[in-house]
Image (cartoon, rainbow, N blue to C red):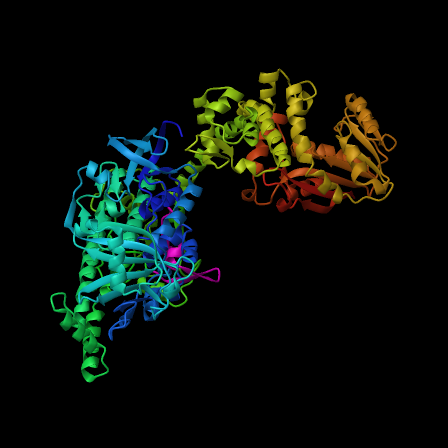
Amino acid sequence: MPAETTVPVLIVGGGGSGLTASVVLADLGVRSLLVERHATTSRYPKAHILNGRTMEIMAQHGLADDIYREGAPPEKSSAMVWLTSLGGDAPYDRKVLHRTDAYGGGALAEEYAAVCAQRHANLGQRWLEPLLRRHAERRIPGGVLFHHELVGFEQDATGVTATVLDRGRGTTLRVRADYLVAADGGKAVGPALGIGMAGAPTFTHWINLHVRADFSAFIEHDDAVVNRVSSLTDDGTVEHCGVVPMGPTRWGRHSEEWTLMVARPPGAAAAMDDRAVVDLVRRTLKLPACHPMEVLSISRWPVEGTVAERFRDGRVFLVGDAAHRHPPSGALGLNTGIQDAHNLAWKLAEVLAGRADPALLDSYEAERRPVARRVVDRALYSAFNQLAITAGTGVSPAATPEWNRAQLTALFADTEDGRARRAVMAEYFATNRITSRHLGVEIGYDYSGSPYVLPDGTPAPETDPLGLRCVQTARPGHRLPHAWLERDGRAVSTHGLLRPGAFLLLAGAEGGPWLDAAAAHGVDALRVGHELRDPDGTWTSLRGHGERGAVLVRPDGFVAARQHSHDDPHAWLARALAVARGHRTPTEEGHRPMTTWDADTTEVLAKLKEYALGPMRFMNVLSCFELGIVDLLAKKPGLTAREIAQTVGGTESAIEQLLFLPVKDDLISHDETTGGYALSGLALPSEADLNRVVPWMDMIKVICLRQLYYLSDSVRTGKVVGLQRFYGFDGTLYAATAENADLRASWSAMMDSVTDFIDEWFFAHFDVAPGARVLDVAGNTGLGAILTRKFKPEADLTVACFDFPEKEADALANFRAHGVAEHCSFIGGDVFLGLPTGFDVVMIKHFLDMFDHENVLRIMRNVHAALEPGGQVYILVPIHPENLKDTSSVDFFPAYFLGCTMGEGGPQKLSTYSRWLEEAGFEVTAALSQDVATMPPDMVPVHGLLRATRK
């Protein structure tokens, strides 16, 4: 990578939040550069539970299947289990204190499935982060740099300038970005900006051990996503240890790897060396001394409950642990960070594309900070509740060892007292549902207070203060309710209808006008009752509008606006999008004025833009061929712009500019790290394909672009004015090619490449009697006669080529060269003056399309006069389909014939040619067109074949 680079977004931090931001931005068409100071993704298991809302995001971006495949199967991660120990032989050892379904498992499955199509996933960050990194690197080659550390940055009104240290090489890179996303865990960016963390500072330290061991003999349940051991150690003290299965190939009690977690007061964790930590864990779990346990890593980290005072500073945004930190209880941290990145990414994409006002970015903090505050509070409640519920056992840290042993012994006694104690303990443990069953916190949050959501005046639904239940509603600001719909006979979730980066309008059965409005504004739109079915009525019960209404859904799956009728759908949708994109708030009429256009005008202006850009795009790509860049990269992929310029000419800057377009269109790839270019899409066509396409493009440049400068004059005069002005030739292109080598070379190369795909099809339908006499009208220098003998050798046909006398010598020479002189001859003449007689069949290929109706009739009447009754004519001609909207031929031929070749003519529909033949006295017996599916996708002309008999 060069010492300086420019990107729209710089992401600092390669953990779960940063890598998610990289993937999502790439899917939204935004180029980013991610830098991570460590050489690899995390070597610690860290967080492992991904909730349904996170998996919705992963599914939208094509990641969910990979995560489910690598993670635990649902039956192995559906419960939380509390144990007294793993080993030991006291009467209270190796007992199950409590087991409960968790995170949508077991009896919770139906409740969770009702509000989300995606189940929870269980995959530790040690395995999740490499998966995300692979996806990010595939999407943005060279856009993910590990072992690169942000060492400084500054921002101004237009962007951020950062200095990044390559820790492996010791070199620095200067990065200029429009925006910076800080996903660095709060280690550098937030402190550098002076952003404080508000809330509960560090109150304990977690020590995590990542171990490889077989604990299956000590654990009864095989479905626990988390085991918590509350152990009365041999000295009578109470210790707690999390025992979390981490797979990675076997799960549940048979996992090969585990995370073991213990807590210590601030400072105490650092004072313990690794040996002391391992001894503490083994003592807490009461593992037999001989039981093997390989320690893979030990990490220590402070636990706090804080939220950043602000999530944005100018052009810098904090996500994940940089914005909020809390205990792991409830599995909310990583999930919240991923959801931060998802919320921010679509807004950055809209602003960078110019569709949204930069003010939209203010909504990131307005929407995500309240969510983070609630998550932090819940995690703190959960952490302390986990400690409090063990009081239900009767054990107390303040009691004597004898008391505690007696309490646990009595708890598990098969007595009336023991049963009573266990019933009381179950009541304590029931409060833990705030940790393992909190749909309202995981998925039920809303952004109804956001400045860029358009309210509809409806009251908010009553929420569950414990956050256990998720109340679905399509009220603006709330997550799009999950419901199963049916599309083309297949079930699809409402969230499955969302495309990355796209707004979605879901309308009722009578919402036809909404589709027109949505099309005008570039919004995806579907009607439930037409394109979609609501088989069980769930969506209809949740949407909050009738059959004439609609909801507008943001790219992140939250409802931006809702309308109950379509009295003026264009105006309402324009206003709703203006609010959703930050151009104005719901109460600001006229704020940040925005010009809008009706649907028809918008469509026309978009087409005019396409017309304006067409020649520029064409010449840009053709120049890559003409300069030899494509051939060079085919032989030497990875060359930089400087190296390309040294070979083909030009400057490094000019080559970079020229390659922007093919890189954008995925024809050529660019590695941001090395600066190298390689063929991407252009590596796919075969050499034969390119040998067909490039001559076609060259012909358009040489013959079309020059002459088309005078198209208006050609139409006005009926002459090819460009030939006069550029070549001093007063006539048609076909006559000019005889005198001008450039024109002849370009046109002939194109025709040779095109006719390969036409002649075989034509002659497959050229059904004439053996021994027939064939006249090839306008046969030029004999190619048609030669091909007739080539494709119909068994028919023993004799063929005469008819054209201007001056072509006779070339034609006869061609006949001799192809060994057909015995069967082919030449007749000179002018088709408008008459044709020779004595032939059974007349063949006219690539000729009638040059002329208007009047001249076509003149030619065909001469053909009619030359044939005996019953004689046949075969015509090959490029055609337009009956529906002109179904073809690209009208994009090319009218301008080509009027301004480049004849000054008149152009293809017609088969039905038009059939009518003209009947006017000339023929009965049409066949009218066929080429099957487009059999043609190369780059070819424009679709040819038709007409067979007619003289009446």
Relative image position of residue 813 (x, y in whole percent):
81, 24
Q: Would you say 745 lies left or right of 351 here?
A: right
Q: Quadrant of the C terminus?
A: top right
Q: Is residue 384 visible?
A: yes
- 143 vs 580, nearest the viewer: 143
Range drawn in magenta: 482-509
Task: Return the x and y of residue 408 as percentages of the image width and height.
Answer: 20, 74
Is residue 374 found inside the magenta-colored segment of the image? no
Q: Is residue 343 above or below residue 626?
A: below
Quarter of the picture containing the N terminus is top left
Q: How many marks?
A: 0
Q: Nearer the viewer, residue 4 or 779?
A: 4
Residue placed furthest toward the front: 290
Q: Would residue 591 be visible to someone looking at this image?
A: no
Q: What is the x, y in percent for residue 262?
A: 24, 58
Q: Does residue 54 appear left or right of residue 451 in this picture?
A: right
Horizontal side of residue 535 vs 191, given as left or right: right
In front of the other: 788 or 325: 325
The stretch drawn in magenta includes residue 504: yes
Q: Quadrant of residue 728?
A: top right
Residue occupying image coordinates x 61% and y 27%: 699
Outermost residue on the top side: it is 728
Splitting the image into 4 quarters, where does residue 243 fall? bottom left
**Residue 477 or residue 139, whichever sits in front:** 139
Please provide percent x and percent y for residue 358: 27, 38
Instruction: Give the residue drawn at x 69%, y 31%.
Output: 752
Quarter assignment of residue 350: top left
